[in-house]
Amino acid sequence: MAVDEGELRRAERIVREAERVVVLTGAGISAESGIPTFRGPEGLWRQYRPEELATPEAFARDPRLVWEWYDWRRQRIAACHPNAAHLALARSMLRRGGIHILTQNVDALHSRAAVQAAGEGDASAAMPLKLHGSIFRARCVECDKRTPLYDDIDTQSVERLPRCQECGGLLRPDVVWFGESLDRAILERAFQLAGEADVCVIIGTSGLVQPTASLPGVTQSGGGRIIEINPEPTPLTAMADLSLRSGAASAAPRLFGGPKLSGPLR
Ligand code: NAD
Ligand code: ZN
């Protein structure tokens, strides 16, 4: 997949010269870390499609099955590592201000990259805005209390599923499911950042999930540019000023300063 060198340089210059940058990421940025996208060939689990499991109806019908799928995904994700794209972004955010990641991913790889890039320092400047929650957090279906959740889930029976420490209610993954609304404050912040940005870099999203797919249009309406990094064309390609047909791990480091040469990339 050869990307035109001239296009890469133009994209790099746009990002370098921009005062404010938003980076909208989707499952594709984590594909080279070994995490399957939903719509890619490995997106199926047993005979189920994600749209059949990642819904409130599926959880109400069979919480054990849904937790079983999430437990499988959590274990798979926990064994993966941030790739060169996550790390280049995190380092760039720590180096210069004005970059915000808006991610649809629930895999926490941006946060792990931030911690890795910051070393002993403060990682908070490189943390993403998580539009769809995190697979390593749970939320009570009764009282809404959120808790971090890193342990393996016992999915042998409904009785053994994780419970809320406050009220005993059933816990569910703290992610936004198909048919659910995004957290309002987070969404408002995302639209504000997109509106203020000089450039929106879209990495690895199919552009099919609303309202997130509208964010690049908000940047464009405010006079900003759009750069897309994706090996495949998407519905957002037509509006992009520059479209880089490339995997995230090779293109993103070019736009965001490249990985440091000291220390192995994991
Ligand atoms: P998607 O599966 O719909 O689309 C993934 C996109 O990534 C595709 O356009 C594909 O061409 C592109 N892609 C594949 N390999 C790539 C690479 N190496 N570099 C760059 N791009 C690449 O994903 P989506 O648009 O994020 O929407 C799916 C929803 O599912 C999201 O809401 C997300 O929360 C959830 N999801 C998350 C994860 C995760 O956290 N890693 C994984 C799967 C699904
Ligand atoms: Zn509760």
Image (cartoon, rainbow, N blue to C red):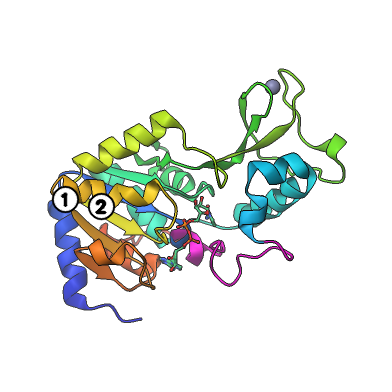
**Is the residue marked by circle 1 packed among few (<14), some (14-19), or many (20+) residues within 10 Å?**
many
User: Is 163 on the left or on the right of 202, as rendered?
Assistant: right
Q: Residue at x 19, y 63 (%)?
A: 241
Q: Is residue 227 magenta?
A: no
Q: Position of residue 55 (x, y in %)?
A: 63, 46
Q: CA distance from mark 1 to mark 2?
A: 7 Å
**Circles 1, 2 touching at the beta carbon (< 8 Å):** yes
Q: Residue at x 18, y 47 (%)?
A: 221
Q: Position of residue 210 (x, y in %)?
A: 42, 49
Q: Which picture quadrant has residue 13?
A: bottom left
Would you place residue 145 above or below residue 10 in this image? Answer: above
Q: Which picture quadrant has residue 227?
A: bottom left
Q: Is residue 33 magenta?
A: yes
Between 49 and 250, the one nearer to me in the picture: 49
Question: Which residue position is annotated with label 2?
Answer: 200
Question: Which residue position is annotated with label 1?
Answer: 224
Between 239 and 42, the one nearer to me in the picture: 239
Q: Position of residue 8 (x, y in %)?
A: 21, 70
What is the magenta segment's predominant secondary structure? Answer: loop
Sequence-first tag of 1 and 2: 2
